Image: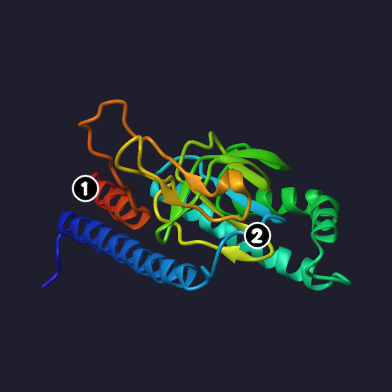
Amino acid sequence: MKLDEHTQDVLRVLVKKAAIIFSLLFMLVMSWDAQRTDASVVGGPIPEDSIRLRILANSDRVEDQLIKREIRDAIVAEMNGWVGELEDPQNLDQARQTIRNHMDDLNRLVGRELSNRGINYAYNVELSVVPFPTKLYGGTVYPAGDYEALRVTLGEGRGQNWWCVLFPPLCFIDAGSGDAVATTPEAKVQAAGTGDSKELAVKQVSTASNQEPEVRFFLWDFLIGILDWIKGLF
C-alpha cells in the first residue's frame, strides 16, 4: 500500500527525530565513559611547581559543553607531544617556555576546532597567573588562589569549566564546576599542597545559615540539557 505524501512527511520527521535522539544518547554514554577515564588519573595533591589548564565553556548548553571537552582533548594531546620532546620533561621552566613558544599554535588549534564545528563565537587563550576558586575533588579541597595557568575562554565563558594540571600532567573528573562546597563557615577541610597557608581551606556557600548547599554534576546537567532539547522537538 502506497502512503500518501502527508504520511510520508510525518514518517520522515519521526525517523529524523529518532536518529537525533539516538545520537544524543550515544554522546551521553560516551561522555559518561570519558568521565570514568578522567577519574582514573587523579593521583595525589597538586605539586607546588605546576601549570594548570582551565577551559571555560561559553555556556552550560550541551553543545558548548561538548566543544569544551573536545578542545580539552586537542590541547592535552598537543602538549603531551611538545613536552615529550623536551630535554628534561620534568623541568617546569622548559615546559613554561614551550607553552609560550606555541601560543600561536594553541590559538590556531582552538580556532580550528571551533571553525570545524561551525561555531563562530570569540575565544581567548592566555598563559598567566589567573584566579581559581576553591576546588573540591574526591574529598580533597584545593584552596582558592592565584595560580599560573593556560586559560582558554570560549565565547562568554559563563559555562561550567574544566581544569587539570597541564604540567606535570594530572587531570581531574569534570564534575560540575568543581567548586567546593562546605556546610558551615567554621568547616575546615584538609587541603592539597605543602605550604602552611594552604593547609586548610574554608568555603562558605551560603549567606543564610539555614540554606542548604547545592551540588551540581556535569553528567546530570548534560542529561537535563538533552531532555530539554528533545522536548523542544515535539
Q: Viewed as shown, does residue 17 lie left or right of 32?
A: left
Q: Which quadrant of the figure contains the N terminus?
A: bottom left
Image quadrant in which you'd find residue 60: top left
- In the rendered structure, which disc, 1 or 2, sits on the residue that comes first in sequence? 2
Q: Residue at x 27, y 58 (%)?
A: 17
Residue hosting label 1:
231
Q: In this rendering, does residue 112 appear at all?
A: yes
The picture places residue 188, in percent across and down from the top left corner, at: 40, 45
Dot 1 and dot 2 residues touching (CB under 8 Å) = no
Real-space Cα separation, disc 1 to disc 2, in angstroms:
46 Å
Residue 153: x %, y % from top left: 60, 41
Crowdedness near tag 1: few (<14), some (14–19) or many (≥20) residues, C-alpha within 10 Å? few
In front here: 227 or 217?
217
Q: Nearer the viewer, residue 18 or 88?
A: 88
Q: At which x and y percent is residue 187?
A: 35, 42
Q: From this viewpoint, which residue is outermost toward the left?
A: 1
Q: Is residue 141 above or below residue 185?
A: below
Taking the view exactly as shown, the residue that stands out farthest to the right is 87
The secondary element bearing badge 2 is classed as loop
Q: Which mark is residue 194?
A: none
Q: Nearer the viewer, mark 1 or mark 2?
A: 2
Q: Residues within 10 Å of mark 2 (few under 14, many from 20)?
A: some
**Residue 47: numbered disc:** 2
Q: Residue 224's x, y, as percent?
A: 27, 50
